[in-house]
Amino acid sequence: EDFCFTRDVENYQKASSDPKELWKRALQEIKNCDALLIDVSDAPTGGRVVEAGIAYALGLPVIVIVKKGINYKDIFDGIAWVVIAYQSLDDVTAGVKDFVSKKIA
């Protein structure tokens, strides 16, 4: 099961007018996750980077995905349990399945 804060909580609207409440909710939702997947193809800043930091601090697996041929900040390598280069979503699915099978084994 996947969870996307923007899609599942905010629904493209403000979830809260209080940023502290918003981040408390984000922290709780991330705590409920088994892992965090972050696409760094567009050089993320702000929310996604903070969410990745939260997951890292909680000891959750951070799965970094990046479109093939895109240079990304290697700072993400420091928190990634795996980096998956992709051309299509099928590549992401296969990479995550491979990661999970090795993690469980």
Image: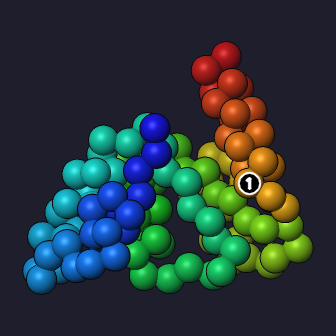
Answer whether residue 78 is visible to the viewer in this image.
no
Q: Nearer the viewer, residue 42 or 89?
A: 89
Q: Is residue 50 left or right of residue 81?
A: left
Count of residue discs: 1
Badge 1 element = helix
At horizontal 69% and vertical 24% (from top left) the residue drawn is 101
Q: Indicate the quadrant containing the C terminus: top left, top right, bottom left or bottom right.
A: top right
- What is the three-letter code of the residue carrying label 1? Leu
Q: Position of residue 102 (x, y in %)?
A: 71, 26
Mark 1 Cα-neighbour bin, 10 Å: few <14, some 14–19, many ≥20: few
- At x 38%, y 42%, the residue is 33
Judge by depth and name the residue closer to the eye, 58 or 20: 20
State the residue at coordinates (56%, 61%). 38
Q: With respect to residue 7, does 31 lie above or below?
A: above
Q: Is residue 73 left or right of residue 27?
A: right
Q: Does 3 appear above or below 52?
A: above
Residue at the outermost top position: 105
Q: Is residue 78 above or below residue 31?
A: below
* x then y, percent, for residue 30: 33, 51
Please indicate whether residue 90 sits to the left or right of residue 10 in the image.
right
The location of residue 39, given as percent across then percent down, is 62, 65
Circle 1 sits on which residue? 89
In the displayed orientation, state which residue is furthest to the right.
Answer: 69
Note whether 23 is above or below 56 in the view shown: below
Q: Residue at x 41, y 50 (%)?
A: 3
Q: What is the x, y in percent for residue 29? A: 28, 51
